[in-house]
Amino acid sequence: MKSLAMGAFGVFLGTIGADPVTGVSRFTFNVHILRDGVGLIPVAMGLFGISEVLINIEAKFKQEVLKTNITGLLPTLQDWKDSKWAIIRGSFLGFFLGVLPGGGAYWLHSLLMH
């Protein structure tokens, strides 16, 4: 029954607007915006928006506070030593590619492919 009701409602929404053959207004109720019919995008946004609101209203969730100690975010001295050549190479390439407006992708591609 729900499927048939939604199908009938969809057909009703499809009939709103001017008849393509005769040009007679159907179900517009003298609202001139409805003469073009109901747009697909506003209907889809409303459909998904309303369903999302109803789902969020219905959902129950449990909140709990987690307290953790965050460690190890900064690199160690050994990490800096291991990556010094990559940092130098990246700084050198980044400087020269950044100086050229719009040329970064071309130069990077030519450097990597040759």
Image (spheres, helix red, strand yellow):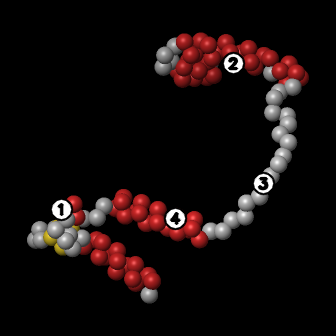
Residue shown at 56%/16% (left/top)?
98
Locate the C terminus and report the quarter of the image it occupies. top right
Residue carrying label 3: 65
Visible residue check, residue 53: yes
Please identify, in this view, whether the residue under mark 1 or under mark 3 is nearer the observer.
3
Label 4, residues with CA under 10 Å away: few <14, some 14-19, many ≥20:
few
State the separation of the CA atoms marked 2 and 3: 41 Å
Can you tell which mark lies on residue 90? 2
What kind of residue is marked 1? His
Residue 83 to residue 67: above or below: above
Can you tell which mark lies on residue 45? none
Q: Earlier in the sequence, mark 1 or mark 3?
A: 1
Residue carrying label 1: 32
* CB within 8 Å, label 2 to label 3: no
Residue 108 to residue 44: above or below: above
Residue shown at 73%/14% (left/top)?
88
Can you tell which mark lies on residue 53? 4
What kind of residue is marked 3? Val
